[in-house]
Amino acid sequence: MFTLIYRENADIVLHVSYLLLDLAVPYFTFLVTIVSTIIIVVQLRSKAKWRSAVVSGQSQSEKSDALLKEKRTSVMLVTVSLIFIVCLIPHSAVLTALSFVRELKLGGAYFNIAFLCYTFTFLMETINCSVSILVYYKMSTKFRTTAQEMLKSEFDTVTFDTVTFDTVTFDTVTFDTTGTFDTTRTFDTVT
């Protein structure tokens, strides 16, 4: 049934599809991200002020440490949200242009420009995915500690099956993170 509707009204169905999926959804996502970030930051600030006013048993340095931690959390959230929006707005702009300028479509007079813009937008999406983890690593001590523990346990020792130096071949050589190595079986053969 939907195939028949599409065949008979292909232009109308595609236009509605572009309006909903390419215009409304991305910009609505940006709006929700901005509003959510603002609400969370305002709530974090109000909770931090309340917490510093209520807590009386802590020293001034402990209170300032807690406020600094809340502030860093807010800065991290705003930074990640801004990176998300800045990196994905070009893609939404290309989709907006595609819905209004028909020559940007496949086979159109300006398709090469659209293709170049798409290449740039995919690069920006990749940057968004790559930079976010670096921001978390830099700004969150808990994330940094967990990541270092996971990577340390994964790459604590490196084992090679056969290592050949100038004249001696070792069957198994294990290097640990301190730079020392341990050989389990050695052969005195010359290779």
Image (tube, rainbow, N blue to C red):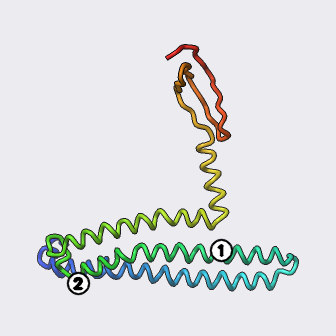
Residue positioned 48% across, 73% down in the render: 83
Q: In this view, does 131 lie above or below 160?
A: below
Q: In this view, does 168 lie to the left or right of 32?
A: right
User: Which residue is disc 1 drawn over?
Assistant: 72
* Nearer to me, 18 or 183: 183
Tell me residue 22's x, y (percent): 31, 77
Tell me residue 29's x, y (percent): 43, 78
Tell me residue 80's x, y (percent): 53, 72
Which mark lies nearer to you, 1 or 2?
1
Q: Is residue 63 above or below residue 181?
A: below
The image quadrant that residue 134 belongs to is bottom right
User: Which residue is disc 2 drawn over?
Assistant: 100
Q: What element carries label 1?
A: helix
Tell me residue 159's x, y (percent): 57, 33
The amino acid at mark 2 is Phe
The N terminus, quarter of image: bottom left
Residue positioned 88% across, 77% down in the render: 57
Residue positioned 34% across, 74% down in the render: 91
Callout 2 crowding tier (Cα within 10 Å): few <14, some 14–19, many ≥20: few
* Nearer to me, 182 or 81: 182
Q: Is residue 58 left or right of residue 35?
A: right
Q: In this view, does 108 lie to the left or right of 132?
A: left
The amino acid at mark 1 is Arg
Q: In this view, does 115 lie to the left or right of 41?
A: left
Residue positioned 61% across, 20% down in the render: 185
Q: What element carries label 2?
A: helix
